[in-house]
Image: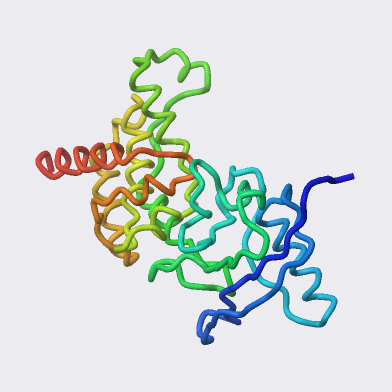
Amino acid sequence: MTTGKTMTLKLHVWRQAGPNAPGKMTDYVANNVNEHMSFLEMLDVVNEELTKTGEEPIAFDHDCREGICGACSMVINGIPHGGHKGVTACQLHMRHFQDGQDIYIEPWRAKAFPVIRDLVTNRSAFDRIIASGGYVSVNTGGAPDANALPIPKKDADQAFDAAACIGCGACVAACKNASAMLFVAAKVSHLSHTPQGKVEAGDRARTMIAQMDAEGFGTCSNYSQCEAVCPKEISVKVIADLNREYIKSSLLK
């Protein structure tokens, strides 16, 4: 049996029937919310009540609910994923809120992330950026061959840190210019620190930045808001890696 205090919350949720439909904030009351619930579990409870009354449930994206997939993308009280360091919305627990509190819930706000419905946005722009160059196409052999390649610990650590990016898009939602620089930089950086990734490093930086621009993302604001909201706490230092690779490739082209 679940114990813990319960609370009543006032929700203000963005509702939008479709990509071309007008949207608006709609008010709901969330009753009997247990402090041990996750934010998504709270929305599940609200949706159960809406379904019982014949109303359309709130559409929101989710998959793993373990902070792995990054699907649970929403702005909570003005901050992507709710503003608690190193967590996604699905890892945000209701104990961080107070009884009677107003909670504003919105989708990512970016031209490159059009709203599909309510809190669900189309983030396929990230997929197209990855397809443009975020991969290794050289023959690296089997797993034993890759493990036989010596990599300095510093490079390995930097590659692993950058590879932690889950592509949730919080960096875009936080940036006043809706920049995808942290995402692109993380993908470029984690490959540029491995021997296999160095072969295409120059082309990768150029093509991914070109695709990022084509998708309509803005330029880096240099305010580091992206780092502050990143659920995997990826440092803006990876943007320096991206810029370095881009400049090198431009000079050698």
Residue 113 drawn at (x, y percent): 44, 67
Q: Is residue 200 left or right of residue 17?
A: left
Residue 31 drawn at (x, y percent): 77, 66
What color scheme is it?
rainbow
Q: Residue at x 27, y 53 (%)?
A: 209
Circle count = 0
Q: Is residue 71 above or below residue 150?
A: below
The quadrant of the rendering that contains the C terminus is: top left
Q: Is residue 212 above or below residue 104?
A: above
Q: Residue at x 40, y 35 (%)?
A: 162
Q: Nearer the viewer, residue 229 or 16?
A: 229
Residue 170 drawn at (x, y percent): 45, 54
Q: Residue furthest left?
A: 251
Q: Is residue 145 above or below residue 120?
A: above
Q: Residue furthest right?
A: 1
Q: Is residue 97 above or below residue 133?
A: below
The quadrant of the rendering that contains the N terminus is: top right
Residue 72 drawn at (x, y percent): 59, 56
Q: Residue at x 43, y 56 (%)?
A: 126
Q: Is residue 185 left or right of residue 247?
A: right
Q: Is residue 27 left or right of residue 106?
A: right
Q: Nearer the viewer, residue 41 or 143?
A: 41
Hey, which quadrant is residue 42 in on the image?
bottom right
